[in-house]
Amino acid sequence: MNPDFSQYPAICGLDGIDLSVQSQEAFEAFGALAPKLGTVASVDRYQVKGSDQAGRGARIERLAFAGMTAVDVYIFLFRKTAMAREAWERSRHFWGRMYNVLAGPAKAHIEVPGHLLIRMFEDTAGQAPYFLQPGYSYQLRLDYAEAFADLYKTPYDAAVAREKMTL
């Protein structure tokens, strides 16, 4: 039985703000929502968009994820979604909820760096939503993340088949 995640926003900032319902002017005017997103490589999450720290976070993130192939993206998504799905399944039982208290709560979202999320949208849909910025982390709803993983599964299967042929 698959849980219904439709009550949760598809993409939100780290503070749970539903970014898809915000206007483009809210992002462009003064970066009103950018401080709520949190930078990747920053201890201080509340830097304004375009600041030095946000720029450094974007550069570090771009370097970290630049060399990722489609296979690497699939592995990243598979691991994140599997861990989230396990926590979600555990939360249906008392002992599972107790385990989740110690290990981390079950969430309907996985955290994905902005640079990678932009790449995933560009690879699959051709264009990323206007509010995604490199250097920030976003929460992608679990069913969306699983759908992205399914799209990246074909290159992964092909790479595994090639590797088996060489052995």
Image (tube, helix red, strand yellow):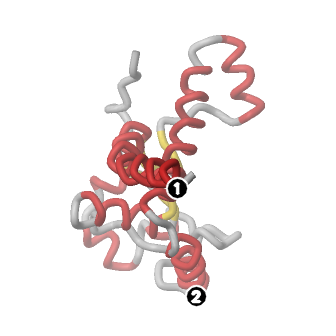
Residue 124 horizontal/vertical position (percent): 27, 58
Residue 29 vertical placement versus 74 (above, below): below
Q: Quadrant of residue 5?
A: top left
Considering depth in this image, is 165 or 1 the residue closer to the camera? 165
Please report the residue visible at 42 percent of the width from the left and 46 percent of the height from the top.
Answer: 157
Considering depth in this image, is 110 or 148 the residue closer to the camera? 148
Circle 2 sits in a helix, a strand or a loop, which is it?
helix
* Residue 166 disc label: 1
Considering depth in this image, is 135 or 23 the residue closer to the camera? 135
Q: How far is the residue under mark 2 from the one under mark 1? A: 47 Å
Single out the residue that lies furthest toward the left.
126
* Residue 52 disc label: 2
Single out the residue that lies furthest toward the bottom.
52
Residue 1 vertical placement versus 16 (above, below): above
Dot 1 crowding, Cα within 10 Å, few <14, some 14–19, many 20+: few
Please report the residue visible at 40 percent of the width from the left and 15 percent of the height from the top.
Answer: 1
Residue 105 vertical placement versus 3 (above, below): below
* Residue 104 disc label: none
Please report the residue visible at 32 percent of the width from the left and 32 percent of the height from the top.
Answer: 6
Q: How many marks?
A: 2
The amino acid sitting under disc 2 is: Asp
Residue 16, visible in the rendered structure: no
Residue 83 vertical placement versus 137 (above, below): above
Considering depth in this image, is 60 or 41 the residue closer to the camera? 60
Circle 1 sits in a helix, a strand or a loop, which is it?
helix
Residue 163, visible in the rendered structure: yes
Residue 12 horizontal/vertical position (percent): 42, 52
Sequence order check, earlier mark of 2 and 1: 2
Dot 2 crowding, Cα within 10 Å, few <14, some 14–19, many 20+: few
Please report the residue visible at 55 percent of the width from the left and 26 percent of the height from the top.
Answer: 88
